[in-house]
Image (cartoon, rainbow, N blue to C red):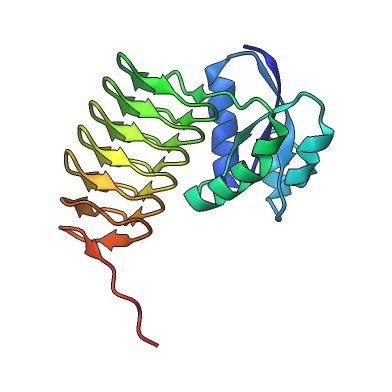
């Protein structure tokens, strides 16, 4: 594949994505990090990375591609939509210690961490993220910016909507639809469809009640 690349996001998730890029060994040269916030410069320096500027600095880097190293699905979507008009390449970066079966679609900018497992006929959308040891069964759809945190278990024929998040160690029953922007709490067991934007927690998962003040 080859080419120059920046990682957008200089926090812990961005450094994890750097590890995946390096392990994938697909000929990409990481020039540095773009971040609008206050990343840990010492930890970045330990990886020989420097902050090149804010997110908008990508416009001044001719021909350079990017991968989003942002853990939050909603924040990742916001930044991805901000960069989309530039038309820069965003390669799918999948760790060699992850596995993908037949008929798996790798969306641009999607990231799959070590130990992740996808079976057959799975569509992974643009800038989606599958974390360490997360599993995805047959005939699933992970829409753009969908996010599975470590150890999440998604059974067959599940749709994970755009920028929806399945928390660490959560389980989603077969055939369930997770609406766009919803959040499944860590360790939850989802037996029914989840409305867009809703947060569900517990076993079985139920909508979280607003906190009284």
Where is residue 46, by image quadrant? Answer: top right
Q: Is residue 29 left or right of residue 73?
A: right
Q: Is residue 193 left or right of residue 15?
A: left
Residue 51 in view here: no
Q: Quadrant of the N terminus?
A: top right
- In percent of width and height, residue 96 lies at 45, 18
Q: Hey, which residue is sitting farthest front in the picture? A: 85
Q: Is residue 166 left or right of residue 85?
A: left
At a point 26% along the width and 22% down the height, the residue shown is 119
- In percent of width and height, residue 109 lies at 55, 30
- Camera-side residue of 152 and 207: 207
Q: Is residue 135 left or right of residue 12?
A: left
Where is residue 141, by image quadrant? Answer: top left
Q: Hey, which residue is sitting farthest bottom in the picture? A: 213
- In percent of width and height, residue 74 lies at 50, 52
- Camera-side residue of 177 and 136: 177
At a point 80% along the width and 41% down the height, the residue shown is 57
Q: Quadrant of the C terminus?
A: bottom left
Q: Can you say whether 175 is above or below 100 in the image? A: below
């Amino acid at each position: 594949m080859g080419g120059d690349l920046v990682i957008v996001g200089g926090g812990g998730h961005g450094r994890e994505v750097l590890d995946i890029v390096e392990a994938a060994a697909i000929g990409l040269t990481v020039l540095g990090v773009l971040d609008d916030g206050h990343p840990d410069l010492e930890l970045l320096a330990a990886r020989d990375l420097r902050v090149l500027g804010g997110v908008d600095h990508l416009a001044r880097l001719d021909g350079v591609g990017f991968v989003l190293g942002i853990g939050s699905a909603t924040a990742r979507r916001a930044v991805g939509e901000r960069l989309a008009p530039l038309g820069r390449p965003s390669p799918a970066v999948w760790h060699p210690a992850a596995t993908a079966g037949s008929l798996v679609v790798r969306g641009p900018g999607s990231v799959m961490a070590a130990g992740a497992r996808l079976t057959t006929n799975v569509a992974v959308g643009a800038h989606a993220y599958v974390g360490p040891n997360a599993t995805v069964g047959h005939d699933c759809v992970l829409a753009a910016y969908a996010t599975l945190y470590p150890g999440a278990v998604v059974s067959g024929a599940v749709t994970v909507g755009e920028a929806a998040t399945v928390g660490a160690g959560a389980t989603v029953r077969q055939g369930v639809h997770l609406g766009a922007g919803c959040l499944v709490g860590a360790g939850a067991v989802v037996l029914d469809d989840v409305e867009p934007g809703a947060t569900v927690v517990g076993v079985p998962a139920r909508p979280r009640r607003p906190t009284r003040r």
